[in-house]
Image (tube, rainbow, N blue to C red):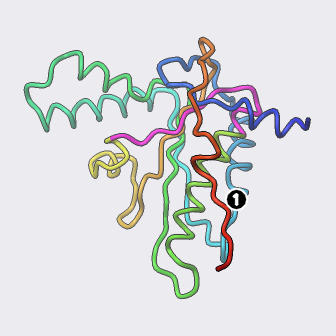
Amino acid sequence: MSHTLDLLKTRRSVPPLFLRDPGPDAAQLTEILTIASRVPDHGKLAPWRFIVIEGDARAVLGERAAACIKADDPNADERRLEDEKRRFGSPVIVAVVSRAGPHVKIPEWEQVLSAGAVCMNLIIAAHAQGFAANWLTGWCAYDPRIAETLQVDKGEKIAGFIHIGTAAESVSDRPRPPLGDIVTRWQPT
């Protein structure tokens, strides 16, 4: 069995609540992002980019998320607001931003798929370095105030927040769909 197959068989999303320090250092993160960018990219458009959220910026973004909740619901309870403040508590978070758009030759859908591939490569690269990761969206990925806070331009979308750190405990795997339920074989008629 190859190392790559073992890696793919053991990759598991770890909830951010269970991600602790250490996260990747600068050199490790550079390698992770370099690997993440090695995806199919019809037309070499790089229809995605990265926003790294680490250090004190995590708490600031969490405070902004809590402020959005409070603005939307002035009666939001303290527990909900505290949960939002901790939303970005993982050691390192990478927001993957999709820059997919109309192009004379490259379908927008292919550009969106490329951004998704970047997210998955990022997770696999983090796992290969011994870290755990999770790809999340949630309301923050779709909220224009969070997009503005992160300087996401009009026409761009957050494809996901990739949380990276060290797993505080092992997390059991979830059931995967039986292949018989998701695989068909096409036969010409």
Say if the magenta span includes residue 133: yes
Residue at 63% in and 25% down: 23
Image check: 59 left or right of 169?
left
Rendered residue at 66%/77% (across/down): 43
In this image, 85 relative to 177: left or right? left
Q: Residue furthest bottom?
A: 104
On the image, which quarter does residue 37 sit in? bottom right
Instruction: Report the quarter where the N terminus lies.
Output: top right
Residue 106 to residue 145: above or below: below
The picture places residue 67, in percent across and down from the top left corner, at 22, 32
Q: Is 145 placed left or right of 86 in the picture?
A: left
Residue at the farthest left position = 75
**Residue wearing tag 1:** 39
Residue 105: % across, % down: 58, 86
Which region shows up in magenta? 125-138
Image label count? 1
The residue positioned farthest toward the right in the image shown: 1
Taking the image as shown, residue 110 lies to the left or right of residue 127, namely left
What residue lies at 68% left-to-right and 50% top-to-bottom?
A: 36
Residue 176 position in % (x across, y down): 59, 35
Looking at the image, the residue that sits furthest to the top is 169
Residue at image coords 68%, 62%: 185
Residue 115: image location, x then y, percent: 56, 58
Three-letter code for the amino acid on which mark 1 is drawn:
Val
Q: Is residue 122 above or below residue 3?
A: below
Q: Is residue 2 magenta?
A: no
